[in-house]
Amino acid sequence: MSVTIYGIRHHGPGSAASLLAALRAQSPDCILLEGPPDGDALLASDGLIPPVALLIYPETHERAAFYPFAAFSPEWVGLRYAREHQIPVRFCDLPQTHQMAQSWPRDDRPVDPIAALGGEEWWERVVEQQSNHDIFEAITEAMAVLREQPPQGREAAREAWMRRTIRQEIKAGRQEIAVVCGAWHAPALLQTNWPSAKEDDALLKGLPKVKVSATWIPWTYDRLSLESGYGAGIDSPEYYHLLWEHPQKAGLTFIVRAAQLLRAHDLPASPASATEAVRLAEALASLRGKPLPGLDELLESSRTVLTFGAEAPLQLIRQQLVIGQRMGEIPPDAPLVPLACDLAAWQKRLRLPVSAAHSDLELDLRKPNERERSKLFHRLNLLGIGWAAGRETSGMGTFKEGWRLQWQPEFALELVRAARWGNTVEEATVACLRERCADGTLLVLTGLAEAALLAALPEALDEILQQLQNRAAQGWDPAHLLETLPALARILRYPDVRGTDASMLERLLDGLLERIAIGLPLACASLDDDAADQIYRLLLPAHQSLRTLDRAPWLALWSSALHKLEKAHGLVSGRAAWLLLEMSQLEAPSALSRALSHAAGASAAAAWVEGFLRDNGELLVHTPELLEILDSWMLPLEEERFLEVLPLLRRTFATFPAAVRRNLGEVLARGRQAPKAQVLSERATWVLPVLHRLLGIH
């Protein structure tokens, strides 16, 4: 009986190749893989195309564990070898049913093993670019030297469970046991280093448990990369895939694919350039004592020959050929929560492929199929599954929507979490909305109402609007009411497209505008500068939304409220005056004259000017009378008052475009004469004789 320990690097192509050679030499009758025994029942799944991940999650859905596998992952190679040779294979790590049941202290590994041995470049040269089944003994010895202190906490429990699993296989009569584990754990699994079974059992005794479930999910190389935050991530998943498939021709294949990629993006990359890039990479490798060009040499030669030092195309090469966007596949019969199955049915029916690469869609909501797509995207966003992100589009008004689709592996976990609301996308979204609106503020409820309309959920929309009406009747701050108007107006614009009954919403707006007309002037009677700035920022969006709806009764209520703001804080009063001017209900010169009258303080007048003119400099250009009134007010101000209002006016004029400021300057320059030359003072005459002598003038 023998137990052979293969200490590997997770997701290392050289480790995988060496492991495959070692397994062929050993011919084991049992393979143990570092991984969660909770997923043993899924190891017999057919139809998996890596990268895929084993997802383990508890019933509470508070956390989850992902175990990714790529084609070049040694664990995947061990699994495929066992399947092909029909020998038993199982996971041997501490089950997640125990790991998730308690909060373990942070595992403080004293060293980074690869960095201590020589770094990433050294590891790639010695291990990942080789296929040597004798290397595992050396790796285990090196790790034994680095493990100065025995592990504690979770790491100690994990290694105890691995040893327990090996003992179980020995007891079952296995003669050739192969154990594939992370290189760091290899020394602890050597039989010569084992503590007694009693000691391991004592360490594992009484571990708490939670009920967990397991499933396969598609994974992506983007999420396998170190940049994603994955603890066992690697810098170059797509490049490692290339090393696995073409170990001897990886450099040549990389450069050829880089040239093809650049040409596909309309960038120059001739066959001659590709040839020179290969030669340069090989020369660099030779100078550095490497048997083959590594990734550093390939990127350096690509930068020099293919991209001519430009960083943008090199970044494209890194993204596509170093990290990659490869996405795995799982079989249709893989265990999924009902919600995920319903989503898959939607994706198939609406012809929406799932991909790790982003794709852009523009939907015309007048077409039934595209309207159904829009519903699905909005519902998923409400569930927190951001597969489709909205983007700006132009044309076709409310009939057009833009989306960017990109699937992320963690969405599988979000589907598991959202499954508590229902078994279908529609059912789960309705339940989610009901839960969120239970204690929502007026603004939150308005956002949920808009979302429910876009997601075509009339049942949920009716309940939210009823909640809105109840909340509005409770005497909300007028500022909160103002915040809701733009969203409510947007909702009212959609019924023609979405076919939603708007009668309840119209009654709601009637009540809100009546409350605003009464409450807003009272609320603005005594505002400080910060509160005035908040109201100022809310007035224009509310005004624009009501003007868009163009309903006479609502506009009458709105203008009534604006007229009553004349004595409010200058910033608010000025903005209200400009909005009334936009509605042709105000004479600008008389309003400005009243605001700048001597009865009003200079600071209050400057605040009014800011509210009236901010972002509206064209009004001064096209109405010279206003500019003249403002100019006449500024000129006689005392120095103290002038310095007081100057910052406010400069802030206002800074919002004008450069062309508007230039036009105003020209108008003012034409309207004034240059000052007459002043007679030199007596002191100035004292300087002239000295200047004459210095200049040699007699």
Image: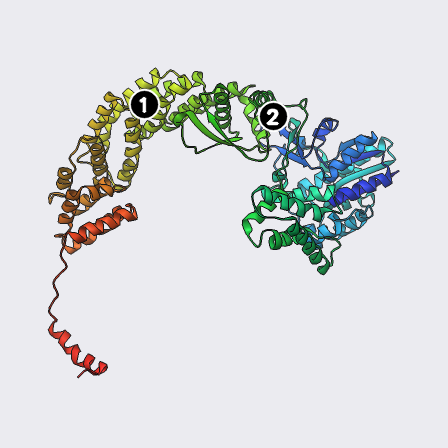
Residue 287: percent from left, percent from top: 71, 60
Left or right? Give the position of 515 relative to 501. left
Left or right? Give the position of 380 relative to 180. left
Element carrying mark 1: helix
| Residue 585 shows up from this direction | yes
Q: Residues within 10 Å of mark 1 (few under 14, many from 20)?
A: many
Relative to 31, residue 647 above or below: below
Relative to 6, residue 56 above or below: above
Residue 15: percent from left, percent from top: 75, 44
Residue type beneath disc 1: Ala
Task: For marks 1 and 2, give the CA distance.
Answer: 39 Å
Q: Residues within 10 Å of mark 2 (few under 14, many from 20)?
A: few
Residue 81: percent from left, percent from top: 80, 34
Which numbered dot is residue 59? 2
Left or right? Give the position of 91 relative to 208. right
Quadrant containing the N terminus is top right
| Residue 440 shows up from this direction | no
- To which quarter of the image does residue 201 belong? top right
- To which quarter of the image does residue 469 belong? top left
**Residue at which label 1 appears:** 472
Which numbered dot is residue 70? none
Residue at 67 percent across and 54 percent down: it is 276
Residue at 15 percent across and 35 percent down: it is 587
Quick one: 434 or 619, which is closer to the camera?
Answer: 619
User: In the rendered structure, which disc, 1 or 2, sits on the residue that comes first in sequence?
Assistant: 2
Quick one: 317 or 608, which is closer to the camera?
Answer: 317
Element carrying mark 2: loop
Residue type beneath disc 2: Glu
Quick one: 141 or 311, which is closer to the camera?
Answer: 311
